[in-house]
Amino acid sequence: MRIKTLSILSLLILFLSCKKEQESNVATNKADIENNEITEKDISKIDYIEFFIDSKAEGITENWAEYQQLQEAITTIKKGDLSFFNDNEETITALLKGLKKSIPKELKAPSISSRITALETKLRKLESLSNLSTTSKKELIATIKDFLVAFSSFNLQINKKIEFDTRKIEKPE
């Protein structure tokens, strides 16, 4: 009789302790999901060199609608809003195709095309990771950094192209 009571009591304790562990795991998972949300503060902590369009290049890029749309997307991403990537596949594809096809003639060069390709790669990676629920906050911030660095390099290349084209080199006679 004592053995039956003791075994029933130990089974009861075992079942009760298992339930508490499950509840604590659920609470931990909810905390992890809440902590995965990217904020403007998180993005402002990203360390990279940001290049902006030069005043000479602004005149060329101000009529480039796809570039302006990309800049607006960058602004919202810097605010921690990744909603640009939520079920927006068609818009992103149209943006990238338009960016490649509508390059102003002053900027048509292999170096600019290669920067657009690099930017497209980073944008696609950010899009895929932002739509996954299993992506960690650290991984997402690293991908955002890669994308911002690619955009900054794109701006730098535009500035270099305009600067190179405006140089006047005298040829010896």
Image (spheres, rainbow, N blue to C red):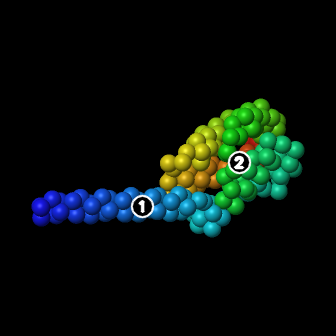
Q: Which residue is mark 1?
A: 23
Quadrant position of residue 86? top right
Residue 7 point in image, percent of width and height: 17, 59
Residue at the far front in the pictured view: 1
Q: Residue at x 78, y 56 (%)?
A: 54
Relative to the observer, which residue lies in front, 155 or 170? 155
In front: label 2 or label 1: 1
Asked whether the viewer can see residue 32, the reply is no
Q: Which residue is mark 2?
A: 84
**Residue 3 versus residue 150 in the image, above or below:** below
Residue 136 point in image, percent of width and height: 50, 54
- Amino acid at dot 2: Phe
Q: Are marks 2 and 1 in contact (CB under 8 Å)?
A: no
Query: Within 10 angstroms of label 1, few (less than 14), some, or many (20 or more) residues?
Result: few
Quadrant position of residue 24? bottom left
Secondary structure state at the residue bearing disc 2: helix
- Amino acid at dot 1: Glu
Relative to the observer, which residue lies in front, 77 or 29? 29
Q: Residue at x 42, y 61 (%)?
A: 23
Left/right placement of residue 31 relative to residue 158 reads: left
Screen quadrant of the C terminus? top right
Secondary structure state at the residue bearing disc 1: helix
Residue 113 point in image, percent of width and height: 68, 36
Screen quadrant of the N terminus? bottom left
Residue 160 point in image, percent of width and height: 71, 49
Question: Spatial distance from mark 2 to mark 1, Cα to Cα?
Answer: 35 Å
Query: Within 10 angstroms of label 2, few (less than 14), some, or many (20 or more) residues?
Result: some
Q: Residue at x 67, y 45 (%)?
A: 85
Asked whether the viewer can see residue 121, the reply is yes
Q: How many marks?
A: 2
Q: Earlier in the sequence, mark 2 or mark 1?
A: 1
